[in-house]
Amino acid sequence: MGFNALKYYIILIIFLFNLSSVDRVKAKDYAVGDEEGWTMSARYMQWSAKYNFSVGDVLVFKYVQGQHNTFEVTQETYQTCDNQSGVLASYFSGHDRVTLAEAKKYWFICAVPGHCLGGMKFTVDVNKVDDDNSVQPSEPSINGVGIIQWSRWAWAYYIVAFVMLVLKAY
Ligand SMILES: [Cu+2]
């Protein structure tokens, strides 16, 4: 194997490894209420209990614009459904994308009168890292961080290798 062939081979390996590691840490979109969307009919605590949410995941609230809305609120406002105060963020687009940017507990309600009391409310507990691939409970944070860091380095190597390849070609 000549030097050039070896170089192509290394680039290919880096690229393939990079693809697989990116897949493992890729943030996921979650449609709130699955097919039912964000409405009065679904049971949202049951919905949110089905999933393990990780930092970077996105909640997508789908509803007919004007019929509902999405309010991220404090725990107190969540409990009382009184949104005179304790509103952290509000969305009205009908296709609201809310990124779960921090490892913490989030509280969501619909602020249309009666809807929160009627059940349009749920909490989400966001984990530090994706622990879907983990078997042991103590491992995910160490593993996850390692994968994320390696993934970033793999991209850097890939870009450098690609630039070298392009320069070589001309
Ligand atoms: Cu509503």
Image (cartoon, grey):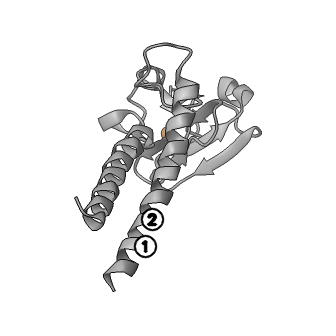
Residue 124 seen by the camera: no
Residue in the picture at 41% in, 25% down = 132
* Frontmost residue, 113 versus 73: 73
Residue in the picture at 44% in, 45% down = 60
Q: Which mark is residue 116?
A: none
Residue 17 seen by the camera: yes
* Quarter of the view holding residue 79: top right
Quadrant the N terminus occupies? bottom left
* Frontmost residue, 113 versus 164: 164
Per the image, the residue denoted by label 1 is 163
Instruction: Categorize mark 1 by other alpha carbons within 10 Å: few (<14), some (14-19), many (20+).
Output: few
- Residue at mark 2: C-beta within 8 A of ligand 1: no
Residue 96 in percent (x, y) is at 49, 51
Residue in the picture at 40% in, 42% down = 21
Quadrant the C terminus occupies? bottom left
Per the image, the residue denoted by label 2 is 159
Instruction: Categorize mark 2 by other alpha carbons within 10 Å: few (<14), some (14-19), many (20+).
Output: some
